[in-house]
Image (spheres, rainbow, N blue to C red):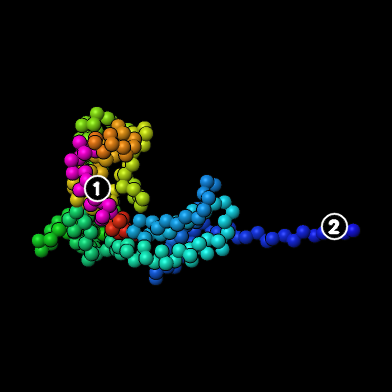
Amino acid sequence: MLPRLLKRTPPQAAPPAERTHVVAGRELPLKVVENDRARRLTLRIAAGGAGLRVTVPPGVSAREVDRFLERHRGWLEERLKKLPEQPLVRPGIRIPVRGVPHLIVHQPGMRGMVTVTAIDGQPALVVNGDVRHLPRRIADFLKREARREVEMLVARHTGAAGRRAKAIRYKDTTSRWGSCTSDGVLSFSWRIMMAPPPVINYLVAHEVAHLREMNHGPGFWKLCKELCPDTERCKAWLKRNGTALQAIRFG
């Protein structure tokens, strides 16, 4: 008797790690991340609608990811409609610096510099050099401002809290404004320099408070409010306006 031949199921193609997905008239970068601990597919929209991230259990096929996205198309469209526009930093638009809108003005010639000035009585950022580098020069300007102001605030609040920071780092994060590691490294998004000064102060106080309280319990919030009495108002401002600041594109 001849052995029975087993019918083999052709392997399903794994989803590409990165591609684009069109939804609500936008072509968005899509990142598919396989996670051994995942038990189901999950979908997340990056800050400002800059992209999509699907986390999948091992072995999920590209077809399953496509079906999952199609099932959630309505949800995606509704969420994306509510997100702010993603303005590209360029001459003629205004971006906030310490909460105050500044007109971006390009002046060719000279080496690339950013100067804070007033034009017709209105705050402005004058950027010299090649216009192609203008977004990066403004981002670099905000980073320099962040280093100067944040480090001063860290020194003030660590002194009041009786703790020392091991290091201060600056990032362009899309999921959080700041962080504090267990060994005392503080990290901040340099975009916080677009927020009003009280909000900048609150963010620094928040992360410094974590040097003593690595949680969000009552003890943490008590210390945070001691360092920044305006905590509740500033926390609400950042929740209400933070996504718009993260949506601004610097390139």
Q: Give the residue displayed 34% in from the left and 35% down from the top.
A: 214
Q: Give the residue displayed 20% in from the left and 40% down from the top.
A: 228
Q: Position of residue 13 (x, y in %)?
A: 60, 60
From the viewer's side, name the closer residue of 133 and 129. 133
Q: Give the residue displayed 57% in from the left and 51% down from the top.
A: 58
Which label's residue is closer to the chain start, 2 or 1? 2
Q: Which residue is label 1 attached to?
A: 235
- Which corner quadrant of the image does residue 182 belong to? top left
Q: Which residue is label 2 attached to?
A: 3
Q: Position of residue 222 (x, y in %)?
A: 24, 36
From the viewer's side, name the closer residue of 5 and 122. 5
Please determine whether, in this image, residue 16 is positioned above or below residue 205.
below
Q: Residue furthest right?
A: 1
Residue 136 makes an appearance in the image: no
From the viewer's side, name the closer residue of 91 and 192. 192
The kind of residue tagged 2 is: Pro
Q: Residue furthest left?
A: 121
